[in-house]
Image: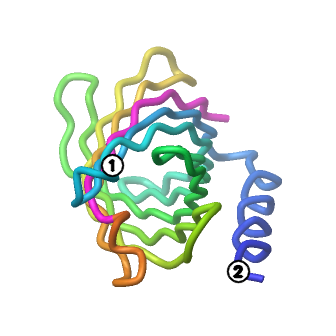
Amino acid sequence: MKKLAIMTVLAIAVGAASATDIGLRVGGVGGLNTDIAGFEGVGVTVGQKFGKLGAELAYDREWKAFTAVSRYSMVGSYDVASFKKLTFAAKAGVAYIDPAVGVSGYAATVGAGVSYPLTKKVSLVADYFHQFSQDRINSFNGNLFTLGAKYSF
């Protein structure tokens, strides 16, 4: 049921994408335990800016060893500084982590991001998050790095 609710929110956001941005990203996660370090994954994002504030929904599919992991997240951001064309933002959010094998659960994320506009509509983005999970899925705690591009409508 939780997956259905999260996917419904993502679908509504995509359907209302007339004044938003859509992004594709790749990334990696390292957990606390070296046995589980090294997620590799891809994702899609849908975001909206409200001045310096931003909101983003994301779906990432990551591979941990031989197991696939789905990660649904909602992240808020605040632009804290600009230097030349670079924009730096503080970010925080929540994620629902659903491995193909094992238990699922929630995590909180805090981090930072930077964006660089290539054109009026296309930007390169890089994000860093530290993830804090529930005890039952604490093997997913760690650092998340992503790189990607966004297209603004």
- Residue that mark 2 sits on: 2
Figure check: 113 above or below 118: below
Is disc 1 surrounded by few (<14), some (14 to 19) or many (20+) residues within 10 Å? many
Asked if residue 145 lies in the magenta stretch, the reply is yes
What number is the disc on residue 144? Answer: 1
Q: Nearer the viewer, residue 71 or 31?
A: 31
What number is the disc on residue 118? Answer: none
**Amino acid under disc 1:** Leu
Residue most extreme to the top? 118
Classify residue 129 by image quadrant: bottom left
Q: Is residue 79 something one can see in this rendering?
A: no
Classify residue 141 by image quadrant: bottom left
Rendering coords of residue 56 (x, y %):
53, 56
Q: Residue at position x 51%, y 39% from top?
A: 41
Asked if residue 116 lies in the magenta stretch, the reply is no
Q: Residue at position x 72%, y 59% from top?
A: 13
| Disc 2 secondary structure class | helix
**Amino acid under disc 2:** Lys
Rendering coords of residue 74 (x, y %):
52, 65
The quadrant the C terminus occupies is top right
Q: Is residue 42 something one can see in this rendering?
A: yes
Q: Which colour scheme appears in the figure? A: rainbow
Magenta residues, dominant SS class = strand
Residue 8 falls left or right of residue 24: right
Count of marks overlaid on the render: 2
Find out whether the residues at labels 1 and 2 contact each other: C-beta distance under 8 Å. Answer: no
Residue 74 falls left or right of residue 12: left
- Boundaries of the magenta span: 141-153
Rendering coords of residue 134 (x, y %):
37, 82
